[in-house]
Image: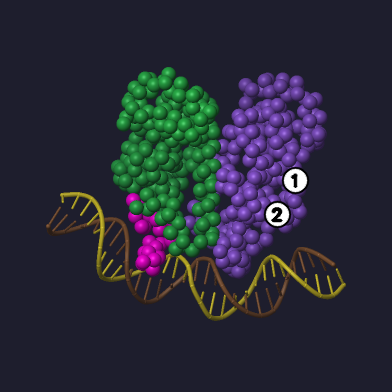
Chain colours: A purple, B green, C brown, D yellow
DNA sequence: GAGGAAAAATAAACTAGTTTAAGAAAATGA
DNA sequence: TCATTTTCTTAAACTAGTTTATTTTTCCTC
């Protein structure tokens, strides 16, 4: 299993385009042994490269360069990756587990900003990008394994791996569209339908987080969610 | 006035960084006459270049190339730039006036997704990026002048002007953060404070759009907004 | 400047979602 | 395994925001 390097997986995807087939096949052969060992050494990083090279083309050299900037970290259930008011220096890529970002409003009500499961990116983006203290906290819901990247290194990557600019552009396009669609739902749908949509869109998340947390994501109280659920049956 | 080309304006901004001063000064001199005529011919496009080169560096050649892809359009008050269900092929940059994107939910309630004033970009982003029919409509609130860019040309720009990738990344970063902050406000603040914040953040928009439209942006009814306003005094 | 249409305000009945409180079920931990 | 804490549910009183209807104001436009 382990010798299925990311390059081979990428190759399989590129096979859809016959014109590029020969080129990548040769490229792949040349790098074969190198990749073989590579993927055994850096196994833990493979998911990230797979994730990125699904969206933009990365050379082996660029992948190498990229990985040097990331570092591994694991967090126990309930442990905080980021606390409100702390400087927000890191961007997290989730390899395993589930994370949640949230904050408390003035009256102490908890609001969930987002969940992040495997292959999602999470941080307090406005504060990360502008090097300000975090407005929200990020906590592990389950024992989780992440890759972290700090702001300085992100900027170095932008300079040294041009295609990462494109990748990050696509990531932000996606995030913007997702957030806008969520806003549209919140403006136009009653809580019951928002809950149904959440279950449909994120079944894996829904099965692993508490109802209280789902309620605080949907912007309703746990009591009201409980009522919606009993009406549904 | 008109001979203040975008390059000269850019130069003024870069003067804050003394080390780059000499380089840009010489560059600017060499291009001076060319720019002079250029900015008289393409005067209408100047704002766009000024807007972009505030965020990334553009060479004269790149700016030239870029502008070829954009075309001008004007819309009368109440005219539609995009109608729901129509193919969403264009991205709009607002030169003058005010636009609004909105949709009707199942029960016929109008929801405002965003406003766009001078120097803002607007489209139905999820549908534009994925070449799908629009879910929302875009309408001119006042007589407006825009620059339009279609999806194919945007992709050509990404290929031929690398720094536009960076520009668009920053645009999307901003849009994502703005939308997330709006979501946080909607989850945690009562309508009265959301209205106050709207007035504070977008005073220029607030003065030009109807209360009904502001209400539909905040996710409340015009009647309730009217009540909030009378309580305020 | 008159007349018609749209926007805004007021008010009263109404409803979606909240609050408070208390009990049942489930997870945690020692 | 038992005690403790947390999550989930139920129910009743409550409130933020809606609906419907009427009046007033603003703003086109002829």
Q: Is residue B95 above or below residue A218?
A: above
Q: How many marks?
A: 2
Q: Which residue is mark 1?
A: A73
Which of the numbered marks, if any, corresponds to residue A166?
none
Secondary structure character of the magenta stretch overall: helix
- Determine the residue positioned at 51% across, 49% down: B179
Q: Which residue is mark 2?
A: A80
Are the residues at dot 1 and dot 2 in contact (C-beta closer than 8 Å)? no
Q: Is residue A147 above or below residue B219?
A: above
Secondary-structure class at tag 1: strand
- Determine the residue positioned at 54% across, 42% down: B173
- Residue A122: x and y, percent? 64, 47
- Specify the farthest residue to the front: B18
Secondary-structure class at tag 2: strand
Left or right: where does residue B104 sit relative to residue A47?
Answer: left
State yes or no: residue B232 in magenta: yes
- Residue B157: x and y, percent? 49, 28
* Mark 1 Cα shell of 10 Å, populated few (<14), some (14-19), many (≥20): some
State yes or no: residue B125 in magenta: no
- Residue A24: x and y, percent? 68, 23
Please report, as a chain letter, where disc 1 is located.
Answer: A
Please report, as a chain letter, where disc 2 is located.
Answer: A
Start-end of magenta stretch: B208-233
- Determine the residue positioned at 57% across, 59% down: A218
Which of the 4 quarters of the picture holds residue B45? top left
Q: Are marks 1 and 2 on the same chain?
A: yes
């Amino acid at each position: 299993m382990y010798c299925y390097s990311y390059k081979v997986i990428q190759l399989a995807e590129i096979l859809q385009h016959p014109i590029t087939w020969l080129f990548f096949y040769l490229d792949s052969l040349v790098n074969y042994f190198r990749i073989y060992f590579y993927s055994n050494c850096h196994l833990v990083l493979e998911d990230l490269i797979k994730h990125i090279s699904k969206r933009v083309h990365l050379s082996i050299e660029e992948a190498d360069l990229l990985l040097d900037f990331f570092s591994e970290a694991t967090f126990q259930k309930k442990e905080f990756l980021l606390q409100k008011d702390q400087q927000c220096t890191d961007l997290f890529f989730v390899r395993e587990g589930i994370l949640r970002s949230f904050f408390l409003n003035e009256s102490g009500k908890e609001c969930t900003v987002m969940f992040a499961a495997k292959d999602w990116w999470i941080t307090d983006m406005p504060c990360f990008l502008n090097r300000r203290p975090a407005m929200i906290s990020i906590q592990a819901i389950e024992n989780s394994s992440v890759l972290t990247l700090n702001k300085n290194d992100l900027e170095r990557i932008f300079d040294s791996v041009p295609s990462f600019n494109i990748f990050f552009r696509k990531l932000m396009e996606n995030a913007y569209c997702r957030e806008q669609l969520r806003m549209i739902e919140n403006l136009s749908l009653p809580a019951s339908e928002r809950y149904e949509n959440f279950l449909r869109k994120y079944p894996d998340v829904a099965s692993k987080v508490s109802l209280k947390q789902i309620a605080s994501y949907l912007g309703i109280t746990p009591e009201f969610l409980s009522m919606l659920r009993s009406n549904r049956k």
